Image (cartoon, rainbow, N blue to C red):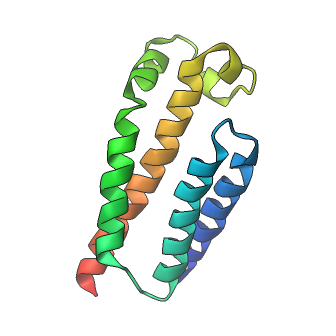
Amino acid sequence: MRIVNFVLAIIFLLFAFVQVNDPDPIIWILIYGAMAVLSIMAIFEFYPRKFIIGLLVLYTAYSIVYIPGVMEWLKQDNKALLFDDVAKMQYPYVEEAREFLGLLICIIVLVVFVIRSRRK
């Protein structure tokens, strides 16, 4: 698990780094930065349970904001727009779907951390 947590920490740091050019960089740098810190803590098998659960609730609540954009993206024939840089400027739902998926990744990792914290 140490290697997995190390890889997660690197990934979340990269996620935070690429948010510099985002329209709302501070919130996303904080979201991914917190995940990087938790991943680093997990390398040492330290799981601050209350903090993890707090972030899990916060990220889940925040992800609900993006559900309309995800639903709009799912209705589209061309799902590949999610990976098109120009499409995010043409269709707001593309950026919302991307942000939702980023939060979903965080939520999945947080759930794993909650489960791991019960074992410790």
Count of numbered tags = 0
Seen at 76% across and 42% down, the residue is 21
Compare residues 78 and 35 and report the one nearer the observer: 35
Seen at 55% across and 35% down, the residue is 98
How far from the left and from the top, in percent, is residue 71?
A: 40, 20
How far from the left and from the top, in percent, is residue 20?
A: 74, 48
Instruction: State whether residue 42 is above or below residue 33.
Output: below
Seen at 47% across and 51% down, the residue is 105
Q: Quadrant of residue 32?
A: bottom right
Instruction: State whether residue 110 is above or below residue 81.
Output: below
The quarter of the rendered structure image containing the C terminus is: bottom left
Is 1 left or right of 88, judged from the image as shown?
left
Is 15 left or right of 66, judged from the image as shown?
right
Residue 111 appearing in the image: no
Instruction: State whether residue 52 is above or below residue 107.
Output: below
Residue 78 appearing in the image: yes
Seen at 63% across and 21% down, the residue is 81
How far from the left and from the top, in percent, is residue 24?
A: 63, 40
How far from the left and from the top, in percent, is residue 83?
A: 67, 30
Compare residues 77 and 62 and report the one nearer the observer: 62
